[in-house]
Amino acid sequence: MSEVDKDLSERYRASARDEPPAQIDAAILAAAQRAVASQPWPVEAPRPLRRWYVPVSLAAVIVLSLVVTLRIQREQPELALPDAPPAAVREKEQKTVEKTPEPRAAPPAEVVLRPAPKSAPAQAAAQPAAPGFAVDPKPRRDAGPPPAAREEIAAESKPIRDAAPAPQASAEAASGRIAENTVELSAAAGARREARAMSAPAPAAPQMALAKRELAPEEWLERIAELRKQGRDKEADEQFADFKRRFPEFRIREPMMERIAPRLAR
Amino acid sequence: MEVSDEQLMLDYAGGDAAAFEVLYRKHRGGLFRYVVRSVREQRLAEELFQEVWLKVIEARARYAPQAKFTTWLYAIAHNRLIDHFRASGLRSVEMMMDELPDPPARAGEQPEQKAEVREQGARLIAALEAMPIVQREAFLLHEEAGLSVPEIAEVTGTEVEATKSRLRYAVAKLREALKD
């Protein structure tokens, strides 16, 4: 199907003979040569490898995501540091402790880090200075002031609570068992910090850098539009310029262009 | 056997500068006319033309032959032209609707000389340069890039029917100009 008849086409071709000047030709060809000369190896991997890039990258991303997710999930209980139990519970536990024979050995670090059942006698006995520790898996991060009943044990358990920022202080302040727990908790806190850092939102710049690498063009444009909406024009302009470098052939639809175009061009 | 444009571009991406030269020689005329007819100003057209090819060079590593090389090349050129029109303060509505004033005189050509031109080809070019940008673009992509209507629609991001309609309008105007 041709919308243009042959006669018109021939007449147009006969009259349209413009060509770029020779110096433009030379400049472009020189730029093309410079580009490959400055890069002695091929831009891309050999073709048999190239087709595996995307699936292998995707698989790696999925596996990494799963590992991180599982790790975070596994560590969730560890985030739960003990709060003091109500006084009645403590009394009961203390009675249990009195009746319980001395434990054989200190519980291993893993036991300390996991939420323990409230009646675990070995643990309760192993931590006389901090009753309730490893007994109540209630998260440490809960907001609001502790109940009055907890205040009396606050001093005792302080070294443990402060374990993450200052493990040495806690070691001095508490008994040997608590010191051990403190060290373990310190390690756990470090792991938690790492986990939180991995799951925490990154600063804007790296986030956008990530976007540049991984986002689909449409998603990237949405982010630019969002920056524009927030009045962050400079960032939006930079991102838009990057986008055009990355996807020079991408056709931006008019409604989207209205949302992302630089202010001057509007 | 002739090497396809897509293969030439891949070869260039792999470091073969000679492949680029073949590609460039093949498309330089059509692309230049597309640009110069679109902006109607020689010096500016040269600048934009050069920028388009530099974008091609820059994008070589990311080139994937999912579509014809020509479609890719002209999509880059189209986007560059749109940027230029927007920077000039031209909005899309104007691109679609406006009949443009007579183009500025070419280098070395006086306005009075231009008025004296009676040759058919010149009338054709004048009519082309006076028509709305989107109609002109549809015609140029058809004639210079050899693109089909669906390919033009892809490059310009418009519907096939709208593209067809633009092309028809452009052809009708050019025929009219030849009758004068």
Image (spheres, coloured by chain):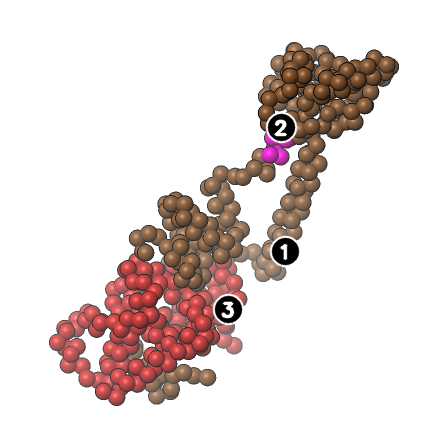
Percent coordinates x, y for residue A105 in the rendering: 82, 18
Under tag 3, what secondary structure? loop
For disc 3, the marked residue is: B67
- The residue labelled by disc 2 is A142
Front in this rendered view, residue B90 or A5: B90
- Chain hosting mark 3: B
Task: Please state the chain letter of the residue tagged with numbered disc 1 in the rendered image.
Answer: A
Q: Which numbered circle lies on residue A55?
A: 1
Residue at (26, 69) in percent of width and height: B40
Looking at the rendering, the stretch of residues picked out in magenta corresponds to A189-196
Q: Residue at x 69, y 41 (%)?
A: A70
Label 2 and label 1: CA atoms lie apart by 43 Å
Element under label 2? loop
User: What's the residue type where badge 1 is placed?
Assistant: Pro
Task: Please report whichever mark, 2 or 1, sits nearer to the chain's N-terminal start.
Answer: 1
Q: Residues within 10 Å of mark 2 (few under 14, many from 20)?
A: few
Which one is in front, A204 or A54?
Answer: A204
Q: Is residue A26 left or right of residue A250?
A: left
Question: Which amino acid, mark 3?
Answer: Ala
- Whether discs 2 and 3 lie on one chain: the answer is no
- In this rendering, is residue B41 above or below A77? below
Is the magenta region chiefly helix, strand or loop? Answer: helix
